Amino acid sequence: MRTPTIIVATDGAASGQATVQWAAREAEHRHIDLLVAHVLDWDWNSARYDFGGGHFEMARKLAESVTAVAAAAARAVAPGVAVTEATLIGNPAARLLAVADGAELLVLGGRGHGGFTGLMLGSVSRHVATHAPCPVVVVRGRTDPAEGPVAVGVDDSDAAEHALATAFAAAADRGTSLVAIRSYLPTIPLYYGADVLAATISTPEQDTAERARLAEQLAPWRMKFPDVPVEALVSHDSAAGVLVGVSHGAQLIVVGSRGHGVIVGTLLGSTGLQLLHHADCPVYLDRQRDQDK
């Protein structure tokens, strides 16, 4: 059996230090190991023209120093955590996806350079975040260790129950409260007209029914985690808008995913992806692995 491990990808940027420190604290919460990984983005096809081989050796040593500095930062934050290092070589997305197989959690930074340029908008890091075989946390916004509740988006999908399990456990580990948010679009009577915004409509009966549904979803988890204070919110606004607003006072946002990298809805432009753009705290992209199903 593999030892449960959190993997954190570091790119050597200043913001990457906050990512590594967050991952180290998370490993400490969970009492599991931490692997600090840095990927040297190296194209072997192009590199074959470097006949002397000196360029690669220099790049490899620099990459190993990036990994070592990040690992030292992790040990300083969480001295009780077993920290190992891995300097990987090749395509960053492919290498990270391969090493993440079997991991408890993969942690990525929300900003950076090199292989992780512009996580929110593009290629490598977004690909990793949406295709990883394990849950992913994107560390962005405020990263202070112990400020605010854990927030979770709740809907009627099968993924919601798994997200609730993750969110309650995270709140319990941190000794903080939980905010559960259910967003729905009410049925608007025809006499309001087409230009009326759903968020401005008073629909007390529908709201009561949605609150009851949310309370029913939360009930078994309240019993399992009796020491976690819970606030339940029902909103007519978009789930992304509400969660982004709550993120300004939260320490972690948890959203479910629906397999194959699809984050709460569609792969692009969905609730989870909007959070990667705009959330003011780390975002946990919950994913139910095959062995959990």
Image (tube, rainbow, N blue to C red):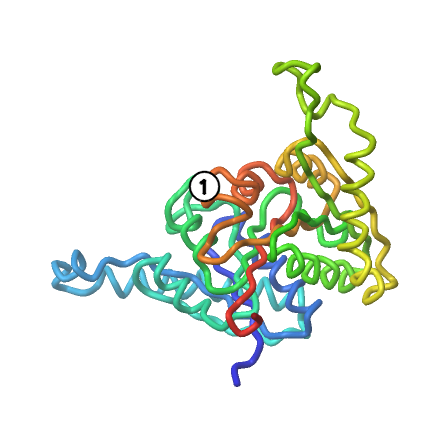
Q: Is residue 248 above or below residue 287?
A: above
User: Residue at (71%, 67%) from the top-left corner?
Assistant: 29
Rendered position, 128 above or below 27 = above
Determine which quarter of the picture holds residue 257: bottom right
**Quarter of the figure that contains the C terminus:** bottom right
Give above or below for 181 relative to 80: above
Please give the name of the residue rendered at 18% of the width and 65% of the height, measured from the top-left corner: 53
**Viewer-side residue, 103 vs 10:** 103
Q: What x and y, as percent, mark residue 85?
A: 48, 71
Residue 155 falls left or right of residue 98: right
Percent of width and height locating residue 246: 72, 39
42 vs 120, nearest the viewer: 120
* 95 relative to 279 in the view: left or right: left
Residue type, label 1: Leu
Q: Quadrant of residue 161?
A: bottom right
Q: Residues within 10 Å of mark 1 (few under 14, many from 20)?
A: some
Using the image as rendered, state which of residue 143 and residue 134 is in the foreground.
134
Along the line of sight, the residue nearer the viewer: 286 or 194 = 194
Q: Judge from the rendering whether residue 180 lies leftward or rightward of residue 57; answer left or right.
A: right
Residue found farthest to the front: 190
The residue shown at (65%, 14%) is 193
Give the residue at x 60% y 64%.
Answer: 74
Would you place residue 215 above or below residue 204 in this image? below
Residue 231 is situated, as x and y percent measured from the top left of the image, at: 83, 47
Residue 126 in the image, given as x and y percentages of width and height:
44, 48
Q: Is residue 138 left or right of residue 89?
A: right
Q: Residue furthest bottom?
A: 1
Does dot 1 land on a helix, a strand or a loop?
loop
> Mark 1 highlights which residue?
268
Q: How many marks?
A: 1
